[in-house]
Image (spheres, rainbow, N blue to C red):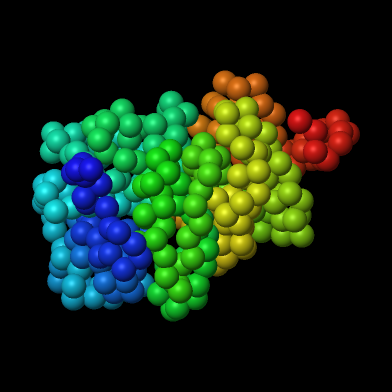
Amino acid sequence: MKQTEAEQKQPTGAAGKLTVTVIGCGRWGSLIAWYLAGHQGHRVTLYGRPESPHMRRFLAERHNDLLTLPDSVRLSTDIRVCAEPENQVILISVGAQGLRALLQELRPLGLHDVTVVLCMKGIEADTGLRLSQVAAEFLDPSVKIAVWVGPGHVQEFYAGVPNCMVIDSEDGPTKRWLVDAFSSDLIRFYYGEDLIGSEIGAAAKNVIGIAAGMLDGKHLSTLKGALMSRGTREIARLIRAMGGNELSAYGLCHLGDYEATVFSKYSHNRAFGEAFITGQPYGALAEGYDTVRALVLLGDRYSIDLPICQAVYRILYRHADVDTELHALFDRSIKTEFYR
């Protein structure tokens, strides 16, 4: 039986070497390029905008403050590299709220018969759309869409500290060959079984991370256990209402990512929450800031109770008093722990 062009582009197993382009040269995009090229030997191009200070530094020095790229990684400031015919996979690592604009740039390139892997964790704030839904609006039907989610920090991976992550897609063969091609002794990948849950859970953990930072800022870190338990439960309710499997909230995409988000000194969302409470400036990207808008929108859309997300939203956007919001959470009516 004759193979399609897309099938011909797929590797035959873990030993197959991919030709990939990584879009986004920030801390996570550069780590992906480092990992796929230096750790696994895939043929990698890292794309960044010519005006990006990250890309300018990589072009001049091949390193940033966190890692050094192997010589095998090709650097490019021309987005047309994404349409090179030998490309098998395009991995996107940009701010979630910038995905739509990026896809508008990619659409004229006429991408087809490739796999696009979304490597950021967020929900489109103005629409409540999952990122795979946004991508599907712009990409040719021949393009397979997958997501890469789960715990891990650049600093730890670069130091050789292993972790477990998830690749999910509505297309079963796509996620299977991606897991085969990307797995190593540094990152153990699991097959995701619920794209809705994987995306919502991964995005929502950043909001819980902000809440954790707020508790740190109020010297109430002892409440993080309750935050994790109750936060996971409310996200599970939302996932179920949206048509996903509520158990996804208890997996690597959400609860499994809490250590890296709720406790780690490397967590941007936790650090942002603490800085917000203590009145300190914070300039790094905290995806949870926009994601909480989307979660409140989705909670209203699906009539789901999201008390922690709503409290974080009121504090960030309506300047509500933190102590008042915390007391309001404790004053809620008594109910069973796992109410539906």
Residue under the image location 61 percent in, 44 percent down: 248
Residue under the image location 27 percent in, 38 percent down: 143
Residue 278: percent from left, percent from top: 60, 55
Q: Is residue 42 left or right of residue 148?
A: left
Q: Quadrant of the N terminus?
A: top left
Looking at the image, which residue sits at the far front? 1
Dividing the picture into quadrants, the one containing residue 59 is: bottom left
Query: Nearest the camera: 136 or 219?
Result: 136
Eyeballing the image, is 17 above or below 104?
below
Residue 85: percent from left, percent from top: 11, 49
Dividing the picture into quadrants, the one containing residue 327 is: top right
Eyeballing the image, is 195 above or below 64?
above
Residue under the image location 33 percent in, 35 percent down: 135
Residue 123: percent from left, percent from top: 46, 37
Q: How many numbered circles are shown?
A: 0
Q: Quadrant of the C terminus?
A: top right
Eyeballing the image, is 198 above or below 179?
above
Residue under the image location 75 percent in, 56 percent down: 225
